[in-house]
Image (cartoon, rainbow, N blue to C red):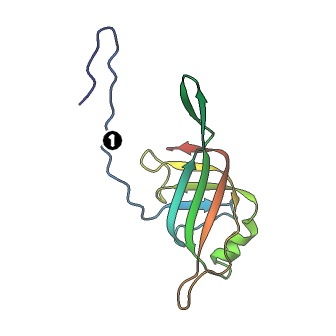
Amino acid sequence: MSDVTPQVGVEPQVQAPVTAVPWVLVHPYISIGTTPNDIEIHCAATNLKVEAAQDESKKETFCGAYVSFKPVVWTITATSLMSYGTTGLWNLLQPMMGTVVPFEVRPDTGVASPTNPSMKGTAMVKWVDFINGNANEISECDVVLAVQGAPTFATA
């Protein structure tokens, strides 16, 4: 299937329609820190966002406007339920807060593959709220990772 009309002397472009089934986020893999002290927080998390932000630069001349984009800045936010104790989120994450550590994120806990790509790199771990909840509710916090430099993406 192609919507391109061939032109004389011009190579036709081949289109690749997106036909993959939409991804349902069930058990994403979120690992923070260096093995063997890394922590995996997918079971504590209630929401995961891996955001790419790019500021734009716009220059205007007498003949037109030109837009370019600055380098991408990645931020990973895992909204998580707070817990305490030797296996609790606070106790495990607190030593990493304010430091730069390795991370890995995948759409699913399975191994990296073309249908489960991996994003790896290093990130600064933002301090999280110690307690944040209403009466008789579970305390919740945002675990925010500010990716340092460019992450790597892999499918194997």
Give the image location of residue 27, x and y in percent: 46, 64
Mark 1: give few (<14), some (14-19) or many (20+) Cα within 10 Å. few
Q: Is residue 34 visible?
A: no
Quadrant of res 35 = bottom right
Residue at figure coordinates x 72%, y 71% from the top left = 94
Of the 4 image quadrants, the one containing the N terminus is: top left
Q: Secondary structure at mark 1?
A: loop
Give the image location of residue 75, x and y in percent: 60, 55
Residue at figure coordinates x 30%, y 43% from the top left = 19
Horizontal relation, residue 152 to residue 114: left or right = right
Residue 54 vs residue 105, the one in the foreground? 54
Give the image location of residue 41, x and y in percent: 57, 68
Residue that label 1 marks? 18
Quadrant of res 91 = bottom right
Residue 131 vs residue 117, the one in the foreground? 131
**Residue found at the very far top of the displayed protein:** 9
Q: Is residue 149 visible?
A: yes
Task: Give above or below for 45 relative to 75.
Answer: below
Give the image location of residue 127, x and y in percent: 71, 68
Which amino acid type is marked by label 1? Answer: Val
Residue at figure coordinates x 60%, y 50% from the top left = 74
Task: Give above or below for 35 relative to 151.
Answer: below
Residue at figure coordinates x 26%, y 28% from the top left = 3
